[in-house]
Amino acid sequence: MKAVSNDSPLTQHLEAKRYYSGFALASDTYNAITAASDGRIYYILSSESYEQGGKMYVYDPQTNETQLLADLTDICGEAGKKAIPQGKSHVRFYEYEGKLYFATHCNIYETIDGIPGLPQHVPDGFTTYPGGHILSYDPATGAFKDLAIAPNGEGILTMTIDRVRGYLYVLTWPLGYLIQYTIATRNLQPIGLTCGRGEAGTVGDDYRVICRSTFVDPSDGRLYLSTAEGDILTYCPDKKTLNKVDGAHLRLDYFGRYDPTRPGSMGYNWRKISWSASEAVAYGVHGNSGYLFRFDPRQSTLTVVERITSEPSKRSGMSDQFRYGYLGFQLGPDDTTVYYLTGGPIPADEKKQEGAESSVKESGSAQENLHLVTYHLPTFHYQDHGPIYYADGTRPSHVNSIAIGADGTIYTLARFDYEGHSVQDLIKISSLLANSYPFLTDHIP
């Protein structure tokens, strides 16, 4: 399919193929999909059930089949304990020395004073959520290991890895504790709060939305995360210090104006950020505004690059309909091309779709088209590849994840209708590298 050029109207579209993995309870998933070095796609489907946890699957492009690997509650050793289950993972998989590392989170909430939190009142016979686990999976043997559990019953919201030093870093929810985990010694080291009292704080006072994406500069091992106020924090593992970065922040006019003490957006936080090894800088996207930016931690500079929302969003001037922004942002296999799954307005003359989007509750976002945008960093080439549809003309919705195969195939987790009810499951969009973005084909392994 021919790609949409910079200045042409959006007359093309991309087609997504749906895969039903067999989990009828599958609900909205965030981040939890990764293309591993074995060529397979690992993903987790969430559950809002008291009886069943989230489930981990693998898709093999060679056989074109999905396979159930495990129930999250089972591999955390909590099956049959009648605790609030491990309902989802909110993090990607991180590969290290042949294993995949990931973490679990709660997916049942109790709203108190208008703010969702960990459930305090649970059904008879159940106990409260025990806390999120750090886990590993060995694709060669199929073995899982339960490595650690977050303190004080906190879930695990955010995770990254320092592959040079063998550290994992997580942020917990709802308080926003930063924790360091050493893979070799299995030592769990709490570092401290990062953002007031996180999403357990009092609105208008110490409430702060927690950063959803962090990264490590491999040269010195420093971890970087953002705050709702727009500050950038860095943790130095050698000195064990957590400090504010001087000279760089996210309080930019282009990103909008936010009250960080109020819920409803990510504030000035970046939504997603990725380290570019070739440039030794990080590229991120600010949620809600959709601006791509470049952060150089060694020079302590942050610069706006381009607005990478969909072409219809750019032309209409609209911000993201999902006010937190989208997590479907990643550098591709070439390390120089940004891939972004983002929303766009539906044309006014297009008939409202029936099916998955209209049969389920919208979780804070209006109906919209899903678009794939790419941005080639060395040439400053922005490209909207058009809206994405299923073969029957319905739209993927509630997309907040992305994985990119070595051949350029795009994978994500999206809602669709299956046998009369809505599920969120795996979808794939055919390779762009060979047919839509020809100057990237040199990078295909």
Image: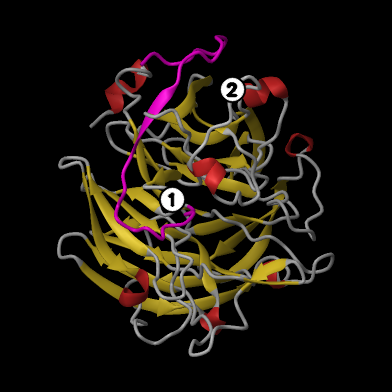
Which residue is labeled 1 in the image?
A: 421
Does any portion of residue 245 appear in the rendered image? yes
Which residue is labeled 2 in the image?
A: 350
Instruction: Classify the position of the C terminus by image quarter.
Output: top left
| Image x and y of residue 265, in percent | 70, 51
Q: Which of 372 and 113 is in front in this view?
A: 113
- Residue 198 is inside the magenta segment: no
Q: Residue furthest bottom?
A: 125
Please tell me which residue is depicted at 61% across the width and 42% down the height of the picture: 299
Q: Give the range drawn in magenta.
A: 1-30
* Mark seen at residue 150: none
Does the residue at mark 1 contact the one at mark 2 (Cβ under 8 Å)? no
Please tell me which residue is depicted at 42% across the width and 44% down the height of the picture: 417
Q: Which amino acid does label 2 sit on?
A: Glu
Please tell me which residue is depicted at 32% across the width and 33% down the height of the picture: 409
Number of residues whose C-alpha sits closer than 10 Å to that of mark 1, classed few (under 14), some (14–19) or many (20 or more):
few
